[in-house]
Amino acid sequence: MRQLFNLQWIIATIILSISLMSCEKDDNNKCNVSNPAEEIAWLKEAIDNVKQDEYSYYAMANYNGETVLYYVNCNPVVNYASFILNCNGDNLGDTNNLRDELTDITILWKHEESKCNL
């Protein structure tokens, strides 16, 4: 009976440890904030600069194990440059060149009446 209790204790400890690690990973996947569009100063300022543009949005993704953010303009007549930025706002490269390497893409912000097909 004592061995069964010890086994149950070990299993419970393993499950708890895995649960705690997965919660920590989720926090890291959002630049260690709950709302990146509001809590990351440089991103909030960038969004404020395009807030009136119905063709603009910001996305978050995973790139080489790191959370990244980037701007998109879906207006078919606009030619623009976009860069993959880490949580600190450091440029990691051109979005067009790195887009195929992005995973787990989510929309962080878009205009309420967005013209983009998301």
Image (cartoon, rainbow, N blue to C red):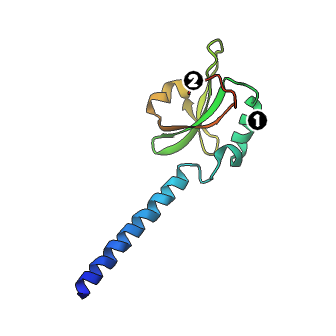
| Label ID, residue 89 | none
Looking at the image, residue 23 sits to the left or right of residue 82; the answer is left
Specify the amino acid type for callout 1: Asp
The location of residue 25, given as percent across then percent down, is 48, 55
Q: Which residue is mark 1?
A: 48
Instruction: Please say if 64 is above or below 115.
Output: below
The residue lying toward the viewer, choosing from 118 and 91, is 118
The location of residue 42, given as percent across then percent down, is 71, 41
Q: Residue pushed farthest top?
A: 77
Q: Which residue is mark 2?
A: 117
Tell me what residue is drawn at x 76 percent, y 31 percent: 49
Specify the amino acid type for callout 2: Asn
Tell me what residue is drawn at x 59 percent, y 49 percent: 31
> Which mark lies nearer to you, 1 or 2?
2
Q: Badge 2, how many Cα within 10 Å: few under 14, some, many 20+?
A: few
Q: Quadrant of the C terminus?
A: top right
Tell me what residue is drawn at x 52 percent, y 24 percent: 96
Looking at the image, residue 21 sits to the left or right of residue 94; the answer is left
Mark nearer the N terminus (1 vs 2):
1
The residue lying toward the viewer, choosing from 27 and 94, is 27
Q: Are marks 1 and 2 in contact (CB under 8 Å)?
A: no
Tell me what residue is drawn at x 61 percent, y 23 percent: 116
